[in-house]
Amino acid sequence: MTRLASDHAHRVVGLYGDPTVSWSILLEAELGVAAAEPEKLRARLSAAVQQYPHLGALPEIERVTDLAAVRDRFASAPYERAAPLVRVAAGPETLLIAAHHGALDGLGLLALLGILLDVPVSSAATGIGERTGRTPFALSAVQRLAEALFAPPGRITPDREREAVGDVFVASHEPGLRLGAAGFVTAAAHATERWNRAHGARTARVVAALGASRRSGAAPEPVHDSAFFRLRLSPAADVAAVLGAQPPEPDFPARSSRLARLGTRLLASRLGSTFLVSNLGLVSTGDTVRSLAFYPAASGRSGVAFGAATTGGITTVTVRARRRDFDARAAAGLLGEFRDAVRDQAARPRGGEPGDVPHQ
């Protein structure tokens, strides 16, 4: 069953899954109580793996002695066939969970957090339900190929380009913000424009990727059940209206050909989106968790993902960026642009966001 779980997780990522990244998503919880001993955490995880065999083999629970080093390894190490699809490390007041995105989505990570802490964890996200794509996968694939060849999505201008592996991670804690999908996407688009302008580059053909849960976060389970949106944004776009009219991307086929995989690898630098945005929403953990930092997978043209999660009156916004193009200082600068744009969006009068979708 372990091999089947591993194969299934890699298939979920699909033909458009950038083969140069690990597809590891991370959730970092700063706890308000001491973490349980590794033996107890492993027993809880063992029960979850037995109930949800798609999680793959049971991993060891690591102790956090150097959080940055463990985070980097959890994020960058590939998930080999038959290896565990979940990674867990615990410190005195920190719990770090990583998983292959084909096994768990953002709400799935939250569910696993609740299992490990043995407390009810939920999100206010209501999900998009059965909303499906209207374009057949084959036609969508042809459209994406033409886009990659002739008019690839714009990118966030790299601060540097050198040989380096993995990603950089930065986070900022803000007073609790109530901002929907459209607000965070708008903030990411504005941050991109400001960043590029400061680096002497134009911002054209912005394509925002958005991860959206199909299910409610009221009682999440450790599964993957998400949709994926690609939003083409003009400079003055009403993101809520674009999102309301845009169907999700079609699901990937069960099988892919060698030719398709080779094409994806060759065009990896031109496929994808300008950036990805994913928000876990307003998360309830009782008094167990003080803050949550969510790091979605960073792939596509820029290799940049913006994340957000709110709990305990704190909204944590994050940037995960490809280390080849951004060092820690540059990532912090990009996070500053995103944080300021999020503040601007949160300060706007709220008359509702028609067409917005609750997402992970």
Image: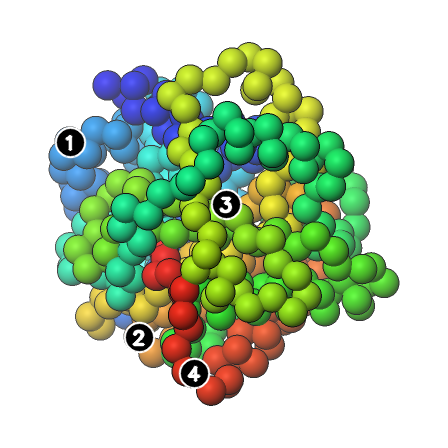
Instruction: Give the residue number, with chain letter if any, for mark 1.
Output: 50
Instruction: Give the residue number, with chain letter if any, for mark 4.
Output: 350
Q: Nearer the viewer, residue 250 or 175?
A: 250
Q: Residue at x 50, y 45 (%)?
A: 297
The colour style of the image is rainbow
The secondary structure type at the circle numbered 2 is loop
Measured Cα–Cα span from mark 2 to mark 3? 25 Å
Look at the picture and state if 297 lies above or below 27. Answer: above
The secondary structure type at the circle numbered 1 is helix
The secondary structure type at the circle numbered 3 is loop
Q: Tell me which numbered mark, 4 or 1, is placed earlier along the sequence.
A: 1
Look at the picture and state if 135 lies above or below 96. Answer: above
Say which mark, if any, is on residue 297: 3
Compared across the picture, whether 73 is left or right of 236 comes to: left
Residue sitting at the far right: 200
Measured Cα–Cα span from mark 4 to mark 2? 22 Å
Tell me the crowding category of disc 4: few under 14, some 14 to 19, or many 20 or more residues within 10 angstroms, Cα based.
Answer: few
Is any atom of residue 237 visible in this view?
Answer: yes
Report the amino acid beneath label 3: Ala
Instruction: Give the residue number, with chain letter if any, for mark 2.
Output: 312
Measured Cα–Cα span from mark 3 to mark 4? 30 Å
Q: Tell me which numbered mark, 3 or 4, is placed earlier along the sequence.
A: 3
- Please report contact status of discs 1 and 2: CB closer than 8 Å, yes or no: no
Tell me the crowding category of disc 2: few under 14, some 14 to 19, or many 20 or more residues within 10 angstroms, Cα based.
Answer: some
* Badge nearest the viewer, 2 or 3: 3
